[in-house]
Amino acid sequence: MIRLLKPLSYYQEKYGSYAYGLKMLYLLMEKQHNRGQEGAGIGVIKLNTPPGQEYIFRERALGTNAISEIYSNVGQKVDGFMSEPHSAEDIEAYAPFLGEIYMGHLRYSTTGHSGISYVHPFLRRNNWPSRNLLLCGNFNMTNVDDIIKDIVATGQHPRLYSDTVLLLDQLGHALDKENHRLYREYRDRVKEPELSALIEYNLDIVRILCNTAPQWDGGYVICGATGSGDMFALRDPHGIRPAFYYANDEVVVIASERPVIQTVFNQPIAHVCELKPGSAVIINKNGRVKVADVLGQGENKRCSFERIYFSRGSDASIYHERKALGRNLVPDVMKAIDYDLDNAVFSFIPNTAEVAFLGMCQGLYERLEECKTDEILRLQHKRELKIDSLREVMSRRLRVEKIAVKDIKLRTFIAESDSRNELAAHVYDVTYGSIRPGSDTLLMIDDSIVRGTTLRQSIIGMLDRLQPKKIVIVSSSPQVRYPDYYGIDMSRMAEFIAFRAAVELIKESGRTSLLTTVYNNCINELKKPVTEQRNCVKAIYEPFTEAEISDKIAMMLTPEGTKAKVIIVYQTLKGLHDAVPGCPGDWYFSGDYPTPGGNRLVNQAFINYFEGKIQKR
């Protein structure tokens, strides 16, 4: 989101364009394209438009090229207006998509449905500007049923079963109540149209948020703007989803990731602030900026998977954390290659694993230097340290190659499920001639192994063509065992390779009755109040060690006919928390959900799995 604090003519004079805000929004969206490729949308609000003229503009599109399509359409409308000479006052009043408030959103559906009707921002229309509402967000709510009951209880009739629509209805109702409150307060003192203007300048956004947000259970950053010029962004109390902001006397900007603000607005890291959990950035009609504590700050559950995979690695903290994740794997990596650095080739699976790969290599370089030092001391002790032997020791190098090449710029992790399997087989190609057939161990690091689709259908078979003695696949994150319900596309339990491996081990070890026990426990748990429910699915993993599950995963992901031995190594939970100390939210790996709704949904997910029901996306 962007709020311009000066007249549009100011940006024309200083930056050479009335479309300064629109251009900045475009750059922010392009630099966060990693956050969603299913669709995109923008919304613009003009604050100086006379009655009878449109002042709220919205454009949305579907597909990986949605940003280009949107800005092409918007550009034609802006260029069409600007093709004729206009005064600054006319541009302020009439130019389409050139306003003071800008909202952009990149979507991929984690639950629910797809289609243009579900692309943000959502818009609530009304003849009174102060009752219009644009809304977008980065979130999932775990208590949608409770929210819809609350809305229906007010007499409303929601059009779609979507958490975004429900929040729009809920916030819209609270906005109406705030308008009514101010109307009653001022009606005996002033008459229309002064009364409406007075309401617009005195809306209490904190009151509106306090009347709605306490009912929400989930991870979220909710962004909204009224037609009269108030703007806000609210973060959940646990900080599950990220939010950052920057403000000066010209502009206020809010985004999901810090480095995009730094780059687009050319600001040092110290000038970009993290929005505290439970707080909201609020900009009123006058352009006054404040940060308000709306919900209070709960226990820190900032999402670790954001840091491992989803967010851009150009953030200073995330870059160092991902390197630490790689470095922390070194002891297990050395064991997997039988401590033989001379006959091992190291590489990574592009593109998000590259930084963890750098950290792993730094740790391996240090191990190699220790080995070289030990060998020199051994030779010296035996009085065998000659110039040739010294040169031989010093010539030892870590064998680092670029083995996998990504051919298609599409992340199958967030592709539609129907096409994910088909895409996976064609995403990568291999670099030939870098492995000594039959003698080298090939080690590849990835940022995560969630479903294992690409490994089984493409990568392992591709690597086996190089004829290594052994293939070691390393995950910089721990085993993903549990669904996510807070905004990342990992909501279907049966797809997780770790879960499927544990179930296979249960069956092979004659413990099939454990599945029935967990099923019955889940049913009983759902009868309790949501705040008292526990995650019963943890029992599925308890009989086995992490190594046993990893070994089973390796067997399940090895394609038939593979000649090399395949080993899979996962990051430990301790290694994760040591590397990412500020973001302890690890429910994907531990099953310790940050809100009560997570326990309820994971129990329901296992019931659906056991009963053979297809989980909705």
Image (cartoon, helix red, strand yellow):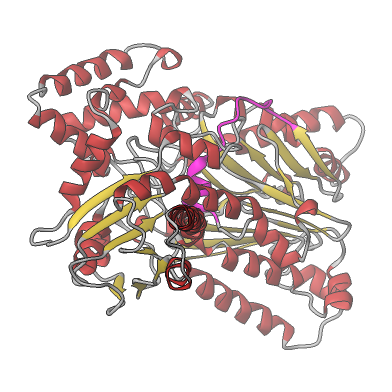
490 inside magenta stretch = no
- Depicted 450 relative to depicted 203: above or below: below
Q: Is residue 97 left or right of residue 569?
A: right
Name the quarter where the C terminus is drawn.
Answer: top left
Q: Nearer the viewer, residue 503 or 414?
A: 503
Q: Residue at x 92, y 32 (%)?
A: 189
**As rendered, which of 390 and 591 lies closer to the eye?**
390
Against 105, residue 605 (above or below) is above
Count of marks overlaid on the render: 0
Report the residue that reaches farthest toward the front: 383
Residue 165 appearing in the image: no
Identify which residue, 83 or 572, lies in the foreground: 572
Front position in the image: 268 or 322: 322
Residue at coordinates 62% horizontally, 30% vertically from top-left? 237
Q: Position of residue 585 (x, y in %)?
A: 51, 34
Where residue 592 sits: x, y (%)?
43, 26
- Residue displayed at 83% across by 69% down: 8
Residue 63 found in image quarter: bottom left
Q: Quadrant of residue 289?
A: top right
Per the image, is 296 magenta? yes
- Residue interval drawn in magenta: 293-311
**Residue 577's spot in the image, x, y percent?**
52, 36
Image position, residue 219 (x, y; %): 53, 36
Task: Check the picture and name the quadrant holding the N terminus.
Answer: bottom right
Note whether residue 372 is visible.
yes
Task: Give the left or right position of residue 298, taking residue 45 as reference.
Answer: left
